[in-house]
């Protein structure tokens, strides 16, 4: 213990000597009393301490630099309104780590969040430089207005706002996926979606419809709210029609998997008789058959990374309106897509 104390004492004396202040002042700044001294003095002492390999107290760093080097991820206490995938979280954490920032997690009820006087006060209480707002469904209008009026460093994730937001480019993803099927020769392409209030369901459909209309093709939407068995039965009905779809584009892995089951029960081969495509956050594989579905990957990791990068810009210039930034999808595989039967 004596050796450790002597080492710390010697370090404080060295820092004091180089910075031109007393040892007690150095102790204050590197401890919990940095507020007793000017910002200029704090910065000078902290910089010298870093040069000598001394790790200052986090509070001292905040006062000396004007930053906490922390970002807060704001979530609703209702999980269905603030979904967070491991890929999104990894993109956020990896990017923050590269910038020597750390992450706070604030999971709050609407009532508690609404009682907060302002976003700046929230940031002060949570000792954070900026906020990533991960409210995606059923966003309270007062929350949108509060964040807009406060003009504090805050970026919306996976929410399509007028500005200061980062989300997947769902409309372009729907367009690109449909164009790929059209280029393969498909003319009867159906878009299937489980009834969803999230904007991405509509955006992907809008992209699909735009591609169909550009090609002079008739679009077909099947927007249902049914269980797994219901989708399988529906698929069998569609595939027995005279002008049956030769390709189905699904909003996600559900309803694609039950549709694939319905196609198999109808006696169709995939992809020889029917092409199937969907949007998911990770490759979709049926481990019972080994089938790898043609998938357009939702860029969750990239959205996380871009959200942090945009937030850093917002922290540097709080009044600047940024975005919206739409991150493109990428194609994973084509195992379940092929030209329609008439062209094979």
Image (tube, rainbow, N blue to C red):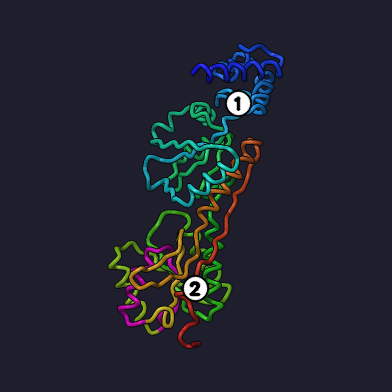
Residue at 52% x, 59% y is 170
The numbered mark, 2 or 1, whose residue comes first in the sequence reads 1
Asked if the magenta segment contains residue 263, the reply would be: yes
Residue at 44% x, 50% y is 86
Number of disc labels: 2
* Residue that numbered label 2 is attached to: 334
Residue 83, x across and y down, in percent: 42, 48
Task: Label 1: state its secondary structure.
Answer: loop
Task: Name the front one of labels 2 and 1.
Answer: 1
Q: Which residues are magenta?
A: 243-268
Residue 293, x across and y down, in percent: 43, 70
* Residue that numbered label 1 is attached to: 54
Q: Nearer the viewer, residue 293 or 214?
A: 293
Instruction: From the viewer's perspective, tell me whether residue 266 is left or right of residue 34.
Output: left
Residue 89, x across and y down, in percent: 48, 47
Q: CA distance from mark 2 to mark 1?
A: 54 Å
Residue 272, x across and y down, in percent: 43, 82
* Image quadrant assignment for residue 316: top right
């Amino acid at each position: 213990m004596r050796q450790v104390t002597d080492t710390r004492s010697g370090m404080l004396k060295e820092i004091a000597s180089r910075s031109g202040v007393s040892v007690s002042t150095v102790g204050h700044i590197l401890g919990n009393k940095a507020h007793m001294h000017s910002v200029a003095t704090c910065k000078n002492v902290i910089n010298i301490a870093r040069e000598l390999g001394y790790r200052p107290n986090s509070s001292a760093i905040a006062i000396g630099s004007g930053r906490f080097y922390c970002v807060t991820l704001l979530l609703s206490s209702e999980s269905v309104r603030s979904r967070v995938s491991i890929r999104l979280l990894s993109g956020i954490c990896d990017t923050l780590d590269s910038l020597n920032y750390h992450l706070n997690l604030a999971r709050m009820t609407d009532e508690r969040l609404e009682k907060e006087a302002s976003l700046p006060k929230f940031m002060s209480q949570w000792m954070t430089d900026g906020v990533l707002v991960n409210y995606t469904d059923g966003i309270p209008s007062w929350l949108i207005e509060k964040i807009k009026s406060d003009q504090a460093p805050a970026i919306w994730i996976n929410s399509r706002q007028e500005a200061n937001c980062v989300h997947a480019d769902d409309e372009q993803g729907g367009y690109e996926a449909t164009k790929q099927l059209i280029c393969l020769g498909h003319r009867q392409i159906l878009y299937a979606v489980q009834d969803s209030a999230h904007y991405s369901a509509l955006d992907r459909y809008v992209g699909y419809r735009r591609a169909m209309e550009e090609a002079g093709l008739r679009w077909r939407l099947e927007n249902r709210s049914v269980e797994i068995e219901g989708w399988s039965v529906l698929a069998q009905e569609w595939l027995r029609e005279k002008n049956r779809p030769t390709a189905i584009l699904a909003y996600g892995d559900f309803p694609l998997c039950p549709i694939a089951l319905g196609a198999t029960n109808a006696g169709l081969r995939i992809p020889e008789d029917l092409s199937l495509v969907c949007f998911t956050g990770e490759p979709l594989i049926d481990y019972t058959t080994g089938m790898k579905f043609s998938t357009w990957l939702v860029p969750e990791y990239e959205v996380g990374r871009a959200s942090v990068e945009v937030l850093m810009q917002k922290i540097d210039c709080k009044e600047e309106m940024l975005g919206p930034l739409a991150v493109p999808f990428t194609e994973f595989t084509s195992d379940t897509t092929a030209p329609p039967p008439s062209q094979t």
